[in-house]
Structures are given as structure tokens and as C-alpha cells.
């Protein structure tokens, strides 16, 4: 059986995963887990210039802020929204304030949690998330919950609330 290194596997997956944000999530996850760093991935691009996935990997590595780790379709949709609207200054899946939060503006003590029914439909998940938000808010961190459905169905409303909060926190 032939086995490839994690950086080479990332390159090979570029030709198999059709959604750019899903592919970026893979690259971000590999970096997060320490399986493939920027240098190793850039080396794959240089060593395999004619490989089918090379242009896509090159594009993902060149993204502003580098490839972002996202863990759900909702997070990927929110990331797409932020990029399309040129909203910057955030980290993804960051533990800047203790618990991992989906999107964090560290200097503003602000975070967005993207909630989906699939990951938050049970009592335990519901209670855990409410406690996490309450503890963060007691410590001065504002957390804005946003659902995947809101991102898709009420994009303008999500943007209005987000921009208003970012502006208020920046003053």
C-alpha cells in the first residue's frame, strides 16, 4: 500500500474537494493539528507545479490571514460573508478568551458563535453553550450568537448587527 505524507495528501485533496471553503478548512485543520505547516505546503506547490490541485493550494495559502480553520458549514458561510464584506481583524476557532469560540475579535473583547441545530439541538449542548456565553459575558467578552439559517436567509440583518457591534466595541 502506498502512503503519502500529510502535506502531499493536502495537495492531492485539492483535486477532490470541490468547495473552496471546505478545502480551506482541511488546510486549516492540518495546520492546527501540526500535520502540515505553511513551509511544507509551499514546498508541495514548488515540487508539484503541474499537479492538478497545485493552483488551488496556492490560492488557499495566499488568502489574507492565511487558511482559516472552520468546523461547520455555518462557520464556512460566515467566513465567506466576512471576506465578501471585507471585515477583518478576527481569528477563527480561537481560545483567546478561554473556551474555543468560532470567530474572535481579540482586541475588541468580542466573539461570534455560529450555532446550527445539528450541533446544538440537545439539552446538554444547549446548557453548555448558555453557560459558556454567560461566563464570557461576565468577564467582559460580548458574544453574538448567529445561526446558519440567519447567515443564509437574513444576510443584511447579520451584517447590520455585526457592523454595529464592531463599531460600538471599537470606541
Image (cartoon, rainbow, N blue to C red):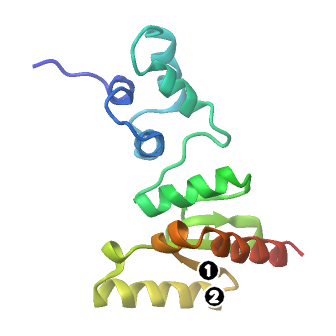
Residue shown at the point (37%, 87%) measured from the top left: 126
Q: Is residue 78 visible?
A: yes
Residue 77, above or below 114? above
Q: What label does residue 159 carry, if any?
A: none
Is disc 2 placed on a helix, strand or loop? helix
Q: Earlier in the sequence, mark 2 or mark 1?
A: 2
The percent position of residue 147, horizontal first and vertical second, equals 49, 75
Q: Is residue 98 visible?
A: no
Task: Name the quarter where the N terminus is drawn.
Answer: top left
Depth order, front residue of 130/155: 155
Residue shown at the point (33%, 30%) measured from the top left: 13
The percent position of residue 80, horizontal first and vertical second, equals 57, 52
Is disc 1 placed on a helix, strand or loop? strand
Residue under numbered circle 2: 137
Residue under numbered circle 1: 143
Residue shown at the point (49%, 33%) measured from the top left: 37
Amino acid at each position: 500500500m502506498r502512503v503519502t505524507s500529510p502535506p502531499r495528501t493536502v495537495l492531492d485533496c485539492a483535486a477532490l474537494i470541490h468547495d473552496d471553503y471546505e478545502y480551506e478548512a482541511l488546510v486549516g485543520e492540518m495546520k492546527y493539528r501540526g500535520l502540515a505547516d505553511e513551509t511544507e505546503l509551499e514546498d508541495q506547490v514548488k515540487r508539484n507545479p503541474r499537479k492538478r490541485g497545485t493552483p488551488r493550494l496556492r490560492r488557499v495559502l495566499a488568502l489574507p490571514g492565511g487558511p482559516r480553520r472552520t468546523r461547520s458549514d455555518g462557520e464556512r458561510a460566515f467566513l465567506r460573508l466576512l471576506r465578501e464584506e471585507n471585515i477583518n481583524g478576527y481569528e477563527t476557532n480561537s481560545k483567546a478568551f478561554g473556551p474555543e469560540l468560532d470567530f474572535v475579535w481579540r482586541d475588541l473583547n468580542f466573539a461570534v458563535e455560529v450555532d446550527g441545530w445539528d450541533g446544538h439541538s440537545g439539552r446538554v449542548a444547549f446548557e453548555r453553550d448558555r453557560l459558556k456565553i454567560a461566563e464570557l459575558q461576565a468577564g467582559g467578552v460580548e458574544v453574538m450568537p448567529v445561526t446558519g439559517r440567519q447567515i443564509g436567509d437574513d444576510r443584511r440583518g447579520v451584517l447590520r448587527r455585526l457592523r454595529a457591534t464592531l463599531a460600538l466595541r471599537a470606541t
